[in-house]
Image (cartoon, grey):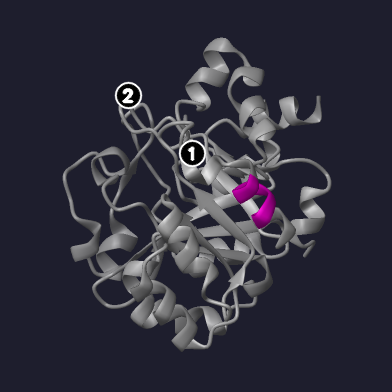
């Protein structure tokens, strides 16, 4: 698998949020991830949950009402219950797809692309050991908040994996940089405005000198949450890519996560 640094030389890395879903394609499934690759994504994001009997699946808990069409709590379901739970497409029709195990998703993405593992930190008491045996270890970018408890847990696990902490303050940045044992391949920067210390030129340049890639979420999650000071997907669609994704590139970001990978890829090529 091509390294992230080598991939970056070809242009800004396009990361697809939960794959590319819609129509009859369900989020966080192999079909959504293959669809994202066909839409030009270089990397896909896989959210992780654990069933009550310890099996891992690709799913963002909290999305049950959307995916299942009813108010369930997937975290309280066994693997047998998850495997048989019907899902609905975007038209609200029941379809044959199901929530998929992480093993199944990994089997479909083996050798194909980089995979960002999100929301797994809730289950690190068993999940990190599972990753030690994964054939896809060199394709994985593990993500977690920049909190001491998670950083310590990752170091103590002995798992050697490329890691990306989620950083929203200078204090969090200083904390993660103090962990020399971690393989800091990238850092996700969260900023609500352009006055953030994280966007200072010397901060950006210092991270780049360390060969740490900078990840930004251009996602428009709703009308209120700001992950990148309003330089988001909706702005790119309404005003043009140069007004959103282009400005993120100008700020020095190396990886942009989006719900619209083809639009970003086409702009990136230009």
Image location of residue 208, percent across then percent down = 70, 54
Position of residue 72 measured from the top left corner of the image (x, y, whole percent): 18, 51
Residue ID at (46%, 79%):
154
Q: Which residue is mark 1?
A: 25
Q: Which residue is mark 2?
A: 223
Image x and y of residue 11, in percent? 78, 41
What residue lies at 57% left-to-right and 76% top-to-bottom? Answer: 182
Residue 76 in picture, x, y percent from top left: 18, 64
Range of magenta residues:
202-207
Specify which label sits upstream in the sequence, 1 or 2: 1
Q: Residue furthest front?
A: 202
The correct choice, above or below, for 130 with respect to 233 in the image is: below
Count of number-bearing discs: 2
Residue 240 in the image: above or below residue 99: above
Judged from the image, the secondary structure of the residue bearing numbered disc 1 is loop
Position of 76 relative to 257 (above/below): below
Front residue (pair 176, 161): 176
Q: CA distance from mark 1 to mark 2?
A: 24 Å
Q: Residue at x 24, y 69 (%)?
A: 78
Is residue 205 magenta-colored? yes
Look at the image and tell me whether residue 213 can be seen: yes
Label 2 residue SS = loop
The quarter of the picture where the N terminus appears is: bottom right
**Which secondary structure dominates the residues rendered in magenta?**
helix
**Residue at 57% across, 30% down:** 260
Q: Nearer the viewer, residue 206 or 41?
A: 206
| In this rendering, the label closer to the viewer, 1 or 2 | 2
Displayed quadrant of residue 241: top right
- The image quadrant that residue 166 belongs to is bottom left
């Amino acid at each position: 698998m091509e390294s992230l640094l080598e991939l970056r030389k070809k242009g800004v890395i396009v990361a697809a949020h939960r794959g590319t879903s819609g129509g009859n394609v369900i989020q966080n499934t192999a079909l959504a991830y293959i669809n994202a690759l066909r839409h030009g994504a270089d990397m896909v994001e896989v959210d992780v949950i654990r069933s009550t009997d310890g099996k891992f699946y690709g799913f963002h808990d909290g999305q049950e009402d959307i995916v299942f069409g009813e108010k369930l709590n997937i975290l309280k379901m066994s693997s047998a219950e998850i495997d048989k739970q019907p899902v609905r497409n975007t038209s609200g029709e029941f379809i044959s797809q199901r929530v998929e195990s992480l093993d199944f998703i990994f089997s479909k993405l083996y050798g194909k692309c980089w995979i960002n593992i999100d929301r797994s930190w809730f289950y690190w008491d068993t999940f990190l050991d599972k990753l030690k045996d994964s054939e896809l270890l060199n394709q994985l970018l593990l993500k977690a908040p920049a909190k001491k408890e998670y950083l310590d847990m990752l170091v103590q696990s002995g798992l050697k994996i490329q890691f990306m902490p989620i950083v929203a303050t200078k204090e969090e940045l200083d904390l993660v940089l103090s962990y020399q044992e971690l393989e800091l391949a990238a850092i996700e920067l969260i900023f609500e405005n352009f006055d953030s210390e994280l966007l200072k030129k010397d901060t950006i340049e210092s991270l780049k000198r360390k060969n740490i890639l900078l990840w930004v979420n251009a996602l428009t999650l709703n009308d209120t949450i700001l992950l990148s000071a309003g330089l988001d997907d909706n702005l790119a669609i309404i005003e043009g890519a140069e007004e959103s994704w282009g400005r993120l590139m100008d700020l020095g970001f190396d990886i942009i996560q989006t719900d619209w990978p083809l639009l970003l890829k086409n702009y990136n090529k230009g």
